[in-house]
Amino acid sequence: MNLLSHIPRGRANATSIPALSRATGMSERECRAEIERLVTVDHVPIVTLPTNPGVFRAATLEELQQARGQIRSRAFALLRRDRGLRLAQQDMVFADGRLF
């Protein structure tokens, strides 16, 4: 079944991954993987926003820009966390095989 045909346009019409799974007969994991492929390979503007549960095809430039901003914010937060863990690793002291 064609997943894209089940993904609505516009924030107000967002649908959930479980609903897409039921509609298409695909597993939730398969739905997420296909959405990833549609966005990264086919450049389909499928997005989700924290203020709006569910996925949808961006219908406006504003919806697309909000989604991109959210993704960049999460990416930078993950990089900051990774840096903190890397620095923590450098500060670790090992004694007698135990971590202190």
Image: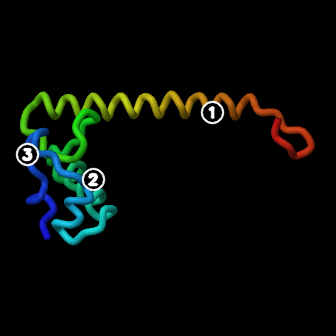
Answer with the quarter of the image where residue 90 lies: top right
User: Gap in Å between the C-alphas at discs 3 and 1?
Assistant: 41 Å
User: Up-down: is 88 above or below 13?
Assistant: above
User: Gap in Å between the C-alphas at discs 2 and 1?
Assistant: 29 Å
Whichever of callouts 2 and 1 sits on the residue coming sooner in the sequence is 2
Whichever of callouts 2 and 3 sits on the residue coming sooner in the sequence is 3
- Tell me what residue is drawn at x 13 percent, y 39 percent: 11
Front residue of 18 and 75: 18
On-image quarter of the C terminus = top right
Whichever of callouts 3 and 1 sits on the residue coming sooner in the sequence is 3
Q: Which residue is mark 1?
A: 86
- State left or right for residue 30 relative to residue 96: left
Q: Which residue is mark 2?
A: 36
Q: Position of residue 56 (x, y in %)?
A: 15, 46
The mark found on residue 9 in the picture is 3
The mark found on residue 4 in the picture is none
- State left or right for residue 20 relative to residue 9: right
- Tell me what residue is drawn at x 82 percent, y 33 percent: 93
Mark 3 surroundings within 10 Å by alpha-carbon count, few (fewer than 14), some (14 through 19), many (20 or more): some
Q: Amino acid at mark 1?
A: Arg
- Tell me what residue is drawn at x 40 percent, y 34 percent: 75
Asked if the residue at tag 3 contacts the one at tag 2, i.e. Cβ–Cβ closer than 8 Å, the answer is no
Q: Position of residue 89 (x, y in %)?
A: 69, 34
Q: How is the image coloured?
A: rainbow
Q: Position of residue 98 (x, y in %)?
A: 86, 43
Q: Amino acid at mark 2?
A: Glu
User: Gap in Å between the C-alphas at discs 2 and 3?
Assistant: 17 Å
- State left or right for residue 9 relative to residue 43: left
